[in-house]
Image: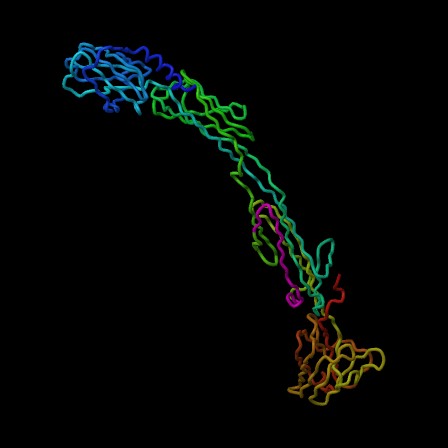
Amino acid sequence: MRTWSRIALLVLALALAFTTVTLAESPTYTETWDGRGADSLHCDKVGEGDRPETGWIHWVFATKGASTGASLTLSGTGSGTYAPGEPLNANIWHIYTPYFDLEGLQAEIALFGGAAGPGGGLVISDYCPGLVEELTVSKTAETSYTRTHAWDIAKMVSTEMGLTTDGIPQIWLYTDGSGNETATWTVNVSYLGFEDSDWKVSGTVTIENTGNLDAVITSVDDLLAGMPVAVDLGVTLPYTLPVGATLTGSYTLEGMVEGTNVVTVTTERDVYAAEAPVVWGDPTTELYRTVNIADLSDLFGEVSLGSVTAPDGATFTYSKAFTWDEFGQEACGAHQFDNTATIVETGQSAEASLLVNVQCLIFKGDTAWAANGDTPGELRYTKRGNWATYVAYNGPKTVSIFAGQKNYAGTATFSEVVDGMITITIHLEGDWEFAASGETLKVEGYTQAPSGNPAPGLFSFKSSVTGTAASIMVPASNMEGEPFKFFGVHLDVGRWVPDPDFGP
């Protein structure tokens, strides 16, 4: 219990112990206390004379003069009439009373037997409310915990035509553009909830000596939801807490507890307590409450899709149109485009792949012969079977070239004879071109019209040419000097055509 409540009883008892007086004679002088000395606090005088530990007020009146007796009557916050005390033989009246609250205290001194002498009148010389132990104890209970948010991420890619192979979406791009279509990627980020952890209650215990007596603390007991908690005060108990000093300790308890935190401070004289409720508010730390979504792909590089904040999920989509022209012949074939979406903070990821098949142009080879004019089949080596043709030469001329017997492929121009040589210039037209390898241009000269199936591989004049234009120089006569009147011109040509085996 509070020490002050005990003092009230002690004051009443001590009031009886101080010398009181009842005088029947009339006073020769009276004076009312005017408040002087109210600042004369001197608890350091405890034990000197009539100054008990429980408190006092030492009144003086100067000077006695001719008076032979005196009495002091208290009212207001005080009560009782008190006679002078030692030293009685001094020229000043000394009167000791119990301590009363000076705020509102009234006092009047009466002298008897003669007039007062010159001096300062009625003054408080010193006083002390009493040596009272009083501790003010307070405490805090701060809660903290961590909330970890959980997420899931999924990714998919879809196409307009919905074609798949082994579960992987596919696009088939044809050279004519008929397979052009758009693919759409979808990233779904789902919120799964949260989990709380790292529960902790911590705080301080503050002990302040607000009395005027040093307090000897013998124990500090802290209970949190009925469980003892160690308080680190930084001192060893018992510990003397001086007047006006403050002792602060700290504590921490891990775990989720509910209730009230109560601390009890015990001294040699009294017991004090304080409490604080344990209140779990919002989490002090939140992990992954907001997450960022990054997307890394072969097509787009690294892209930030955005952020998501709990408890909401989010869906991100983006698209790309694919055309054959985007790839062309140079990049024909199969392409797999991988794509990974990642929750940056947690490292969770999801993948989706798209296969893009680009139709190739394949070289479809064919045999071509120079005709005698502009009509296919003119001057054939043989009338039946083999359709190979040759050219009659009697001077400069330009003739047509036919591939596959009847397909116009370009022209062959024969020059005049220069220094015994004839230059044959080839110009392929349309989408025809020479084959990429081998002896693609072969020429044979004849002094008379040939017959039978020709054997181009055995022709006398050969050249490896590519592209769409070429020239070859051949003799105008044979080794015996007989002029060539006919020429067989054979070409290995072809056209680039869409791969017929392409498709799902």
Find out whether residue 436 is within the magenta segment.
no
Q: Is residue 224 left or right of residue 459?
A: left
In the picture, which quadrant includes the C terminus?
A: bottom right
Q: Where is residue 439 in the image (x, y as percent from the top left)?
A: 70, 73
Side of 120 relative to 105 (left or right): left
In the figure, residue 454 lies in which quadrant? Answer: bottom right
In the rendered image, residue 136, in percent from the top left (x then y), is placed at: 40, 25
Nearer to us in this view, 119 or 462 = 119
Left or right: where 308 falls relative to 382: left
Report the magenta residues as a range. 307-329
The residue located at (14%, 19%) in the rendering is 118
As for residue 309 lying within the magenta part, the answer is yes
Q: Establish if 135 lies above or below 393.
A: above
Where is 159 relative to 345, above or below? Answer: below
In which quadrant of the rendered image does the N terminus lie? top left
Up the image or down, 444 lies above or below 327; here it is: below
In the foreground, 411 or 33: 33
The image position of residue 332, as x and y in percent, is: 67, 64
Location of residue 13 with respect to 223 vertically, above or below = above
Between 480 and 50, the residue placed more toward the observer is 50
x%, y% of residue 357?
70, 61
Which residue occupies the extreme right position in the image? Answer: 384
